[in-house]
Image: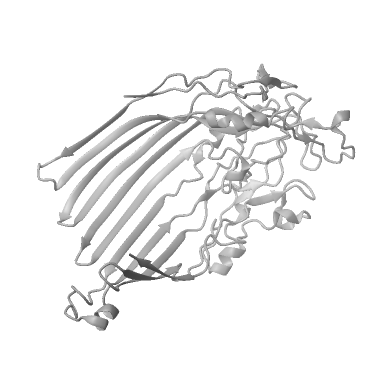
Amino acid sequence: MRTESSTGWSEAQSRASVYTFTNNVISTNPTSGLSNALTDNKAKILIEPRLGFAWNVFGNGTTSVTGGVGFHHTLLDALDYRLDQAAPYNTTYSYSTGSTVANPVAGTGKVSPSTVDSGMATPALLSYTLKVEQQLAPSTTLSVAYSGSHSYHQIMNGDLNEPAFTRVNGRVFYPASGTPTAPAAPVYANPNVANTTSWWAGASGNYNALIVDVRHDLRNGLQFRGNYTWAKNLDDGSAWNTSVSSNTPAFVSVPQLPHLDYGRAATDLRHIAAINATYELPFGDGKHFLGKTNGFTSRVISGWSLSSIVNLLSGFPFSPQLGYNPTGSGDSRNPVRPDVNVGFTGQLYTKGTTAQRVAKYFDYTAFSAPAAGYVGNVGRDTLSGPHYANVDASLLKNTRITERVHVQFRAEFFNVLNHTNLALPNTIVYTAGPTQGTLASQATTPQYGSPGVISSTANTSRQIQLGAKILF
């Protein structure tokens, strides 16, 4: 039984700020001069029981069953940096498109609030595992395991100044959105402030994995290990801010309905295989071949070994997105996804050469631009990026100079096959101009590029590194 507690943190000069909410509407001005903006400390007593067991099934150590379950929390003490980013200490002003007056003091700009839920719950996770391990030979074992977890009260990031929405034919609709060719000005729940960056503990996650592991300890000069993981990782949101959201939206599309974003987590790699091996070449002193040589010949042919690491991964998930917000909700960070094109009958992913896949990794015509006011019905992270395969190798030579001095030479080859692994493609399928709903490839705003185009690689080309060191 484990317990953990936190008295929270305090700001020595009382320079913390937080925005409060009345009837779910954010306040115009923050509550400032606080020593701690997390007014309701829910981490005073955290009960975290753990249970584990190990069973030697037949008593001879050849078969074992192990398992465990544990409850864990993540303290919020590190969130203090968020609370000095709110007004009046560190403020961002937002201006409407076309504004020519840039004088916040005169009131032409609106503050973009940055805040956290002052009564935020402590993120929690329940993890569990069960493993069966079997000895196949004196130096070889096989294990098969199930690993899983369920988390809740996970931190979400979104705009909590969005206006009210309604349901039209089961879809989320913002009434004050205008039309595709004449979008309305952003509408805010509180018109006195602009869009917000807000954190609250409302997300959940689920992870389940089957793990197969084969291990051969060093015997007859050979050592290897190979493991394969088949997993599924789902959550409501995987990123707290844009700096860590390279393959997933950082903001919840509809903060009041976080379940709309429930889907593949940013780290949902369905298949992961890793193999590493080391082989001591059977030549020289004490080995099968030329084991009785001595002097200079022994130093030349002894002490060689080869090693390699192979990594194989399925693609990271990503979301097709719009380069504009058709809802009129005022959120300019565009965590907005398109609609599914029900008339699409083609092949979603390009199956041709590398050049063809780079030019158009996925067919963007599988998606359509939502009508003004509607939230797109494509799920978060529903597309999969390119697979990843990499092989590293090394050649090692140990040479004994004296009883106490050895020289080690190493030649390392990274991406030894010089295999090109593609990065994620451009995810923007529709842009804002010349009218909302224009294909990004046809737009007059070139910053969005072309949808589906891959412009970088996920690894470097082959690299060779030589090194030597003296051990004494």
The residue nearer to you, when weighing 458 against 304, is 304
Residue most toward the bottom? 297
On-image quarter of the C terminus: bottom left
Q: Position of residue 38 (x, y in %)?
A: 58, 21
- Outermost left residue: 59
Q: Position of residue 331 (x, y in %)?
A: 70, 36
Q: State the image coordinates of residue 413 (x, y, percent, origin top left).
A: 43, 69
Q: Is residue 32 visible?
A: yes
Where does residue 162 sit, x and y in percent of width and height? 69, 29
Residue at figure coordinates x 26%, y 37% from the top left:
67
371 up-or-down from 434: above or below: above
Protein image colouring: one colour
Answer above or below: position of 361 versus 464.
above
Q: Quadrant of residue 292?
A: bottom left
What residue do we see at 56% from left, 64% from top?
Answer: 357
Rendered residue at 73%/54% (across/down): 447
